[in-house]
Amino acid sequence: MDDVKTSGSEKPKSFIALRHPGARMYLIGAGLAMMADFVEHVITYWVLWNKFESQWLNGFATFSHWIPFLMFSFWAGWLADRFDPRRVIQCGMCLFMFVSFAWGILFYLDILEMWHACVLLVLHGMAGVLWSPAGQVLVHDIVGGAQLQSAIRMLATSRTLGLLLGPAVGSGLMIIMGPTWGIFFNVLIYLPLTLWLWRAPYGPGFRKELKPARRGLGGFGEAVKTIRTISGNSIIVSMTLLAAATSFLVGNAYQAFVPKFAIDLGAGDAGIFYGLLLSANAAGAVIAGVVLETRDFLKNTPKTAYILALLWCLSMGVFALTPSYGIAWTALFFAGFLNLAYNSISRTLTQLNAPTEIRGQVIGVYNMADLGLRSFSGLVLGFAGSMMGIHIGLSLTTGLLMVTLLVLLVVLGPKITTAKET
């Protein structure tokens, strides 16, 4: 039987993560850093389009954002296990700041070339890879296992708020300062998290568990060893497969097609209604964070995560096929709500069941599935959409995902139901 764990025996309190001073500071800093991430996207994408008008470069920007997660997430998790996660996060933040500063120099000197953009886009993706596993390990260090789900949920909410504010702040900086000085200013937004981490009393030196022995640089063999170690834990396996299936078949690739949906729904001004449709998804995620912290009515079990993911598929199917703009907006709102709900449960269960000495590496494997495979969801949806139209294409990929999740639930059901909420 698996050594399964849930969120702890204590009755959770509302917004418990915000009551913890360390978690509160990290959540604020992470929200600002995520906002800075999207500010950079807003400014650089605008400059790149106006300078090169290259659809290929736009496509590469999306691909370069996710492919580093597929290729390097395990390695980043290994770093978070073997070194202080605070320092790994700071390295990610410094790389973010370097990229923003480099954009600014290229804009100011007016010497930006396409190869410059490709290099900086890849480095930006690498910065996100360094941050992700280390950030989750640090959150675990700050709040412990008992309140981990609350912290993960609030972290997702904080990042979503950053996503919502990023486009507005980025646009404002371009209007007030122009793209060059706006991107220079963006460097400063990463500083609060970077500076706080310098003396934050968390990490390996403050853990009660034994520190893992340092070994050579983690490579393919180390990854295989980690996968073998967790292969006997059906909770981790089932949550990783859930993340892999949803990211590969649907992911967030539909967002690139939202302008087309807005036009087809007869919204009139595709620009305005495109933004409203995208905000519906993010708004649903924020509301989910607030509601689930206030009313923790969902069981922290693998079965719950799968049921929520199936409901997410249903919402996405409704969005794909409805001719009504109002129904489409509502479907995306519920999709955002359900996505945060099932994702927070799956991440929590994965971290709680990961052996302490390889927690970062397990998170890295999970991120390869959850974030890295998004590199291919655009190809899957793009192929289906080109063959039969984006509406039918999205509904078919969503339907295929539902079938896949049902099969996984049936196959893994007898094992994952051993996880009981406590």
Image (cartoon, rainbow, N blue to C red):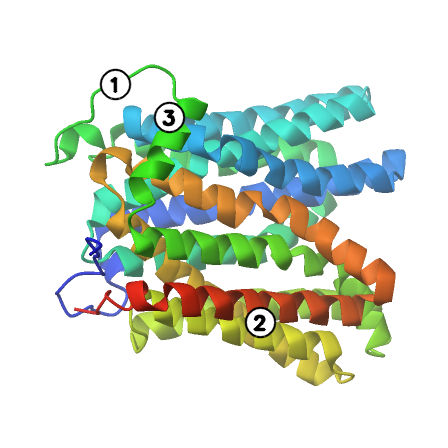
Q: What's the CA distance linking mark 1 and mark 2?
A: 42 Å
Q: Residue at x 54, y 76 (%)?
A: 334
On screen, 31 above or below 217?
A: below
Q: Where does the image place residue 235, in percent across and percent down from the top left? A: 32, 56
Residue 263, by quadrant, is bottom right
| 136 sits to left or right of 355 | right
The kind of residue on which mark 2 rests is: Cys
Q: Where does the image place residue 381, in percent across and percent down from the top left? A: 73, 57
Q: What's the CA distance linking mark 1 and mark 3?
A: 13 Å
The kind of residue on which mark 1 rests is: Arg
Residue 55, by quadrant, is top right
The kind of residue on which mark 3 rests is: Glu
Q: Which residue does the numbered mark 1 point to in the structure image?
A: 214
Q: Which residue does the numbered mark 3 point to in the structure image?
A: 222
Q: Where does the image place residue 333, in percent across and percent down from the top left? A: 57, 74
Q: What's the CA distance linking mark 3 and mark 2?
A: 35 Å
Mark identifier at residue 110? none
Q: Which residue does the numbered mark 2 point to in the structure image?
A: 313
- Crowdedness of circle 2 by 10 Å Cα count: few (<14), some, many (20+)? many
Image depth: mark 1 or mark 3 in front? 3
Instruction: For the C terminus, give its image quadrant.
Output: bottom left
Residue 115, by quadrant, is top right
Q: Where does the image place residue 43, in percent across and percent down from the top left? A: 71, 41
